[in-house]
Amino acid sequence: EALASLALRRDPGATADGHPVALLANIGTAEDAERLTGAAVEGVGLFRTEVLFLGRTDEPTQAEQADAYARAFAALGGRKVVVRTLDAGADKPLAFVTRGDEENPALGVRGFRLVRGAEALVRGQLAAIARAAERTGTDPWVMAPMVATVEEAAQFAALARAAGVRTVGVMVEVPSVALRARDVLAEVDFVSIGTNDLAQYTMATDRLLGDLADLLDPWQPAVLDLVAATASAAAETGKPAGVCGESAADPLMALVLVGLGVTSLSMSPAAVPGVRFALSRHTRARCAELAATARAARTAGDARAACLALADPEV
Ligand code: PEP
Ligand code: MG
């Protein structure tokens, strides 16, 4: 069995000069985890647990949740896994907890804000994750979505540690947290930047509106500045800062993210080989140069074009 689990491990990605960058998968279900068996990923950087409950009208029991998490953990055979607590609300409503009366659900009770009216639900989920971890001999990292303040980060860390979680983090999806990343990192062990929501909230643009895609572009200089602020705060404290938004799947952007100091990239599994290849063609210093070039640009279009001109043409 030890041999089998060794065979499932995957090497980290690395830059041309050998600087390691974890390449991880985004999943939503235990089936997704099972499909990773033969995939060239080191583990899971974002387990979107709300996906397990999207179709349900009633709250899942702790035992049901623990079974689902244990199934996913077992499928990963000891590989790294970052579990995100329920991100209900806004574009992911859950019938048993999401209120239907908000005029601006994206700015309402979503993500970790659920704790305000449904602390038992959050506690129950953390207990289920801890149970599944114990049952499968897994040591999951656990993070909360949609955190906006240091107090929320501290509250989540206390709840997670009380449940027996050893490694606790928060997502950076709201500009306030990126701007104050130093203080937030003092409360947790890691952060994971969700560029989908970070772009939505930085650019004041609904992520579901395709007509406004130019405003949601992760190459927007303001979004890159917030990623940079987060990554440098993390580097100062020696704590990991990953990216788990869609931008991590773009090989050129992945180089920029690594250049900004991001330590892991989580994406849909199909995107991993392209990102792995891009990294292998660029040294860490070249990634830093790409990051500086992107940040010096005045527009999203200029940032991307300048990086395209500087990167290996095969990427
Ligand atoms: C994000 O916001 O970038 C993210 C990874 O979370 P989700 O897409 O599930 O909101
Ligand atoms: Mg998000």
Image: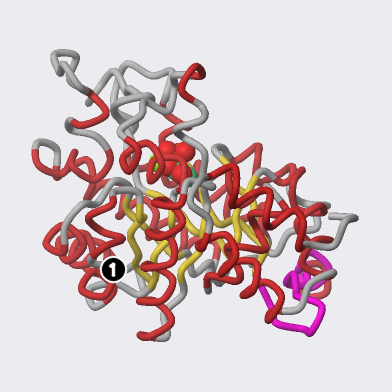
Span colored in magenta: 5-21
Taking depth in this image into account, of 146 and 88 the one nearest to the observer is 146
Quarter of the image that includes the C terminus: bottom right
Measured from the top left, where is residue 260 in percent x and y?
53, 70
Q: Residue, x 44% and y 22% (percent of image)?
A: 208
Q: Residue, x 44% and y 71% (percent of image)?
A: 231
Taking depth in this image into account, of 141 and 110 the one nearest to the observer is 110
Compared to residue 210, the image places residue 137 above or below, namely: below
Compared to residue 253, the image places residue 220 above or below, namely: above
Measured from the top left, where is residue 110 in percent x and y?
24, 34
Q: Is residue 112 left or right of residue 214?
A: left
Classed neighbour count for the residue bearing mark 1: other residues with Cα under 10 Å, few (<14), some (14–19), many (≥20): many
Does residue 143 show up magenta in the picture?
no
Name the residue type under label 1: Ala
**Dividing the picture into quarters, in which one does residue 15 lie?**
bottom right
Image region (quadrant) for ligand 2? top left
Provide the residue designation for mark 1.
181
